Structures are given as C-alpha cells and as structure tokens.
Amino acid sequence: MGGSYEVMSPWAEVDPRPLEGINPRLADLRGRRIGLFHNGKVAAKPITDAVEAELRARYDDITIARFGRTANLEVAETSDRARYEEWVKEVDAVIHAVGD
Amino acid sequence: MYDAVFTERLQKPAVALVNTGFALDARSAASGKGMPGVRVVAETVPCECTEPERIARGVHAVIDDIVAALTVPLTRDEQSPPPPETAGARGIVFDGDLAEVQRFFYQRGWTDGLPIIPPTEAAVEEMLTGTDLPRDCLVGRMIPRLGKVTVEKIAINAVMAGALPIYMPLLIAGVEALLDPKSAFGTFEVSTGSWAPFWVVNGPIREQLHVNGGQGALSPGDIANATIGRAMGLIVKNLGGARKGLEDMGVQGNPGKYTMVTAENEEAIASWEPLHVQHGFQHEDSCVTVSFPNTYLQIWPYGSDDKGILRAIMSNMVPRWRQLTLLVPPGHAQTLADAGWTKGEIASYLYEYARVPAYRTPEFWGTPGMQRVRPPLNAEDPTPLLRSPDTMRVVVSGGAGAFMGMAYGAGTWVTKPVTLPSQWERLVRKYRSLVPNHLRY
C-alpha cells in the first residue's frame, strides 16, 4: 500500500520511580507464626484451610493467624487497613489466597 | 495480588497463591504497584471452587512451592529489580505504509483487532482541536499500569478509533468517569465477569455529536456511537494497560467492549427526569454516564398497556445481578407515563413486587460472596430481585417497535459533565453535516 505514515505511540508513559525489592525470606518455618489471608473470593478461604492443614502436618510448632475479607477489595483501600497493619505486625510471613 | 504487595511494604515476606491461568495477571498487578518481584505460586485449584477435596488436592500439589516461596533466599533481581521497559511510549514509534502500520500496532497489542487510523502528528493535531486543554495536561493515572492519561494520549487513541475531534470533550469526561473510584473501574476492567463499559450520553451534546439514541442505537452504523466506545476501549487498553488475557481476565469476554454507547431520548417524556438530572445535573448540562453491565437481554412486552410492559420486565428479571439499566423505547415510555408512572415509581414497584422463590437465588444456597445478612429461611420465601430501588435506572432509548433492553451488571452509575472548548460552536458547524445519506432502493 502506498504512502508513508509516521505514527505516534498510543502506549502510556508511566512515572519514573524506583522499583521496590521484596523482603528477605525466613530461614525456616519451624516455630513461626504464619498469617493466612483470604480476599473474600469463593475459593480463597477454603484454600487457606487447606494450607493450614498442610502446614500443621509438616510443622507441629507452627502458629497460624488468619485475616479474611468479605469483599474482594484491596485491603489497603478499605476501612480494614489499620486492623490489617496491626495483624501483620504479629506474624512472621503471610500467605495470600486469591481464589482465582 | 495488591494485598501481597501491601504486606511486603509492611516489611513482611509474602506469597500469593493464584490459579495458574492468572499468573501473568498477578505479575502485571505486582509490577503496576512497583514491586515486580512479589512471589507467586501458581496452583491448579479451579477458580471459584467450592469442593474441599479438590482444593485440598490442589494445595497439596504446591505446598513445597509455598514453603519455598517463604524460605528460599532472594535473587538479585528480587532484592533490587531492574528498571522497567519504558521504550515505545513517547513520540514517533514507527514509520511505514498503511499495511505496515496496521501490522506493527497489532503485533504490539495496541489495537482491538480491527484496523486503526494511523495516529500521525497531523491527525493528532487535528484531534486536539476538540479541546482547549494543553496536550500535556494530565487527566489522571489509569490502573492497573498507572499509565499517565494525558490529553495527547487520549487524542492518539481517539484517532486510532476513527473518532472525530468534536468527541474529545466527551472522551475526556469519560476518562474522568472511569477514574472516579465510585465507578469501581479498577475491578470491572480486569474482572473475570467481562463487564463492559456502557456509556449513556445526555444533554445538548447528544444532538451536536449525532449520538444515536433511537432506532438500533446499540447496533453498528453511527460514527459517534461506534468510535466513542471504541476510543474508550483503546484508552483502557493502551493507557491503563488492561490487555485481554494478561490483565483483563474476562472469562467469556464481551462484545460490548468494542463499543456500547447510546443517548437518552430526553424529549420523549418531558415529565421524566433524564439520567443526568437524576444524578444531580441540570437539563442543559451535557453529561456522560458509565456503568458496567456484563449481560444484555432484550424482551418483548406481555401486553401493550403499562401492566403488560411491567409484567414482562418482572418476568425477565433474573436473580444474582446487582444493577439494572432498563432501556425503554419511547412508545412504551409514553404508555407508562400516560398511566402515571415515573422512573422512580417503576424502580420502587419492581423492587417491591419482582420476587422469586428463595431457592432461585444464589443466597439461598449459601453461595460465598452472595450471602444476605438475614437469608430466607424457606425455599419458597419470596425474595426481591433488586437489592433496592436505587439499583435500577430507566433510560428512554431505542426506536420504533416493542423490544426493551435490560443491561444487567454490578456497581453503580457515575455521571460526569462534559466541558466544552471555547470554539465549540465552530466545531459543531464543521462536523454537523457528517451523517450517513443512505441510497434508496
């Protein structure tokens, strides 16, 4: 096809910002307090139930703490944020069940 | 996934368990939040699974991976992620003939599958005549990628969609509607439910843009209806970064995502408040309203009087959906208005009397996420199909004939005013004659 087109990008720019790394991992889960989070999706809580059963079968000294949401919303954007922040302080790591 | 990022920001190691089909989506979500290294374990538990044994099997299969995600030391990239790819977002990105441009854009994933109009400097400059805002004006940042939605980027995507410059004010208002947290756009745009943005245009701008709210308004053939929705779809994809199968995880998809635009026939029933007036604006304001249906049903009345119309609506309402936009053609609207019905009374009446036995509702079966505070006790208890009268809107739209439209969705309606540029009347005159003149046969 004839003609030439110099075309502009439709793709958005994003703010330049340093990407964040993740936190160092635990040496072992023995004796740890593990948080199980479910986000309110149908399968999420049953998945945390299954994870708890698996962890307890492996580690007899593990402690489990739970935090659940009834609506699939970002917890940081809800009124549960402060309660979640307090809960996270009490655990060594968190396993998030998304449900899909 | 955002919750796992939040946990890491609270200085605790996290891992997210997601269905294997959502692993790429999870990665994009984490990157969009600035933390691409969040660990993800992909499991094979069926989405929305309610069977404990299958869930247990699926979790058992990945428990080693879960433990590893919390205990295996970090890689260098996880500790200090490399900067993201930023190429391709600025200025001229390609030079080629028409076919090459189509191929380039399609292969970049920047189209909706249909051919695009090449967004050249000249075409974008022309598009920008539709607004007084400077091209670098930042309207907002659109999730999930948090892409910067500038006026220039809106114009580029509008050119691609085949839109006219005169649509720019409405497109900018449309972006503002999506960015309003009340629209819950961030959930709907990427949800497995395949919710499609449904745009209703009100006020004088309907006529000025030739937005069809009459015969076959939701069918192809009107440049305004076709390209306004299409432009918004490209904006969501290219500025928000919601791409099908990567971030937009709609299971079945939705043809409404190509475009779903109508105008309300405000003049049909003078006594009925148009949608934007119901939402607090004045009749003379030009506005656009977005909502997110995922289902569109067309029904035939059981009789030509108001009772026959309402019976058909009640009989075709379905359990589960949380929001209903009822599209009533002007003939039925006149019948209802003549019998004394207002829009609000129709919604209140349907809330009161449109009921089904409890066993037909997901709440009765304890479907997670669908519970009521006080669920019905008996299978035959009459259960309302609307959560409240405010979960329904009546919009006069459509042409001659008897069919009504029912757009079922969730969330709410968000209406934004359209701000017109100083040279608006000149623009209207320039494009006023652009209408189809069909050959007679």
Image (cartoon, rainbow, N blue to C red):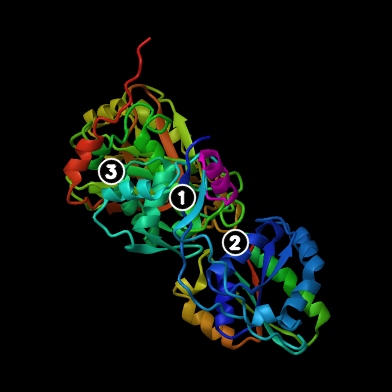
**Which image quarter: residue A40?**
bottom right
* Magenta stretch: includes residue B127: no
Residue A49 appears in view: yes
The numbered mark 1 sits on a residue in which chain?
A
The secondary structure type at the circle numbered 2 is loop
Q: Position of residue B38 (x, y in %)?
A: 64, 74
Span of residues in magenta: B97-110
Residue on which disc 2 sits: A41
Residue type (three-letter) at the residue carrying disc 1: Val
Q: Residue at x 43, y 37 (%)?
A: B406
In the rendered image, residues at marks 2 and 3 fall on the same chain = no
Cα–Cα span, label 1 and label 2: 43 Å
Q: Are marks 3 and 1 in contact (CB under 8 Å)?
A: no
Q: Work out whether A88 lies above or below B215.
A: below
Residue on which disc 3 sits: B166
Residue type (three-letter) at the residue carrying disc 2: Lys
Mark 2 vs mark 3: give the one in front: 3
Residue B1 appears in view: no
Q: Residue at x 44, y 45 (%)?
A: B160
Mark 1 vs mark 2: give the one in front: 1
The residue most toward the front is A3
Q: Give whichever of B299, B39 is nearer the camera.
A: B39
Prevailing secondary structure of the magenta residues: helix
Question: Of callouts 1 and 2, which one flags the residue occurring earlier in the amino acid sequence?
Answer: 1
Q: Residue at x 54, y 64 (%)?
A: B87
Per the rendering, the mark at residue B51 is none
Q: Give whichever of A48, B117 is nearer the camera.
A: B117
Q: Position of residue B422 (x, y in %)?
A: 17, 51
Task: Tell whether B132 sits left or right of B350.
Answer: left
Mark 3 vs mark 1: give the one in front: 1
In the rendered image, residues at marks 1 and 2 fall on the same chain = yes
Residue on which disc 1 sits: A7
